[in-house]
Image (spheres, rainbow, N blue to C red):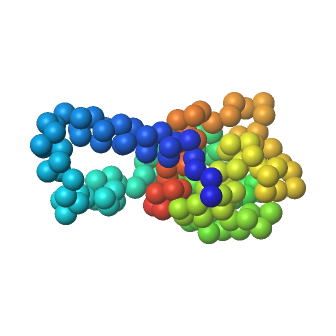
Amino acid sequence: MRTSPAFLAIWLSACVATEEVADTGTESDTAADTDDTDVDTDDTDTEESPSYLTDVYRPFLEESCGGCHVEAGYIHPPITDDPSHLIGTASVDGMVYVSPGSLEDSFLWYKITNRQAEVSEGGTRMPPPPEDALSARAVAAIEAWILGGAAP
């Protein structure tokens, strides 16, 4: 399984923050802190999963994709404020557009990172040239949304 650069950046920053906290204690404090009974390893309590509408669609996809991928248009899938057109829906290549929790199984991720040739017969990145590719922030937001479970 491949890991996204955005996920690695978040993971590394969490590791550095943990090391900085551990380095501030004395030797006796650090030894006392090795008891795992107090450690909360479940990240779901501390961070909310990204929202499609507020973290992905409105800041990035509405302007970049909304002009062509309209609900009544001929370009599929429609990219609207409702992600149900993307989640679990098969693309023309047979791969689903968004598979919650999995970049490798999400065709949208391949299209926005210009890697569609790895899983498809062709096509271009989205948005297509001569339009500018999505920004690194936009790609990171979409990756985080997919990896976070593709919440509406």
Q: Give the quadrant of residue 48.
A: bottom left
Q: Residue 65, position in %: x, y?
A: 64, 44
Looking at the image, residue 140 lies above or below residue 2: above
Q: Residue at x 60, y 64 (%)?
A: 99
Q: Residue 41, position in %: x, y?
A: 31, 58
Q: Give the quadrant of residue 89.
A: bottom right
Residue lying at the far right in this picture: please name it: 121
Quadrant in the picture for the N terminus: bottom right
Q: Residue at x 42, y 52 (%)?
A: 50
Pick whichever, 43 or 146, lies toward us. Answer: 43
- Relative placement, left or right, of 50 versus 64 is left
**Residue 78 in sight:** no
Q: Residue at x 23, y 60 (%)?
A: 36
- Relative placement, left or right, of 10 versus 86 is left
Pick whichever, 107 or 70, lies toward us. Answer: 107
Q: Give the quadrant of residue 20.
A: top left
Pick whichever, 69 or 113, lies toward us. Answer: 113
Looking at the image, residue 133 lies above or below residue 122: above
Q: Residue 62, position in %: x, y?
A: 56, 44
- Relative placement, left or right, of 110 versus 63 is right
Looking at the image, residue 61 lies above or below residue 120: above
**Residue 123 in sight:** yes
Q: Residue at x 58, y 60 (%)?
A: 102
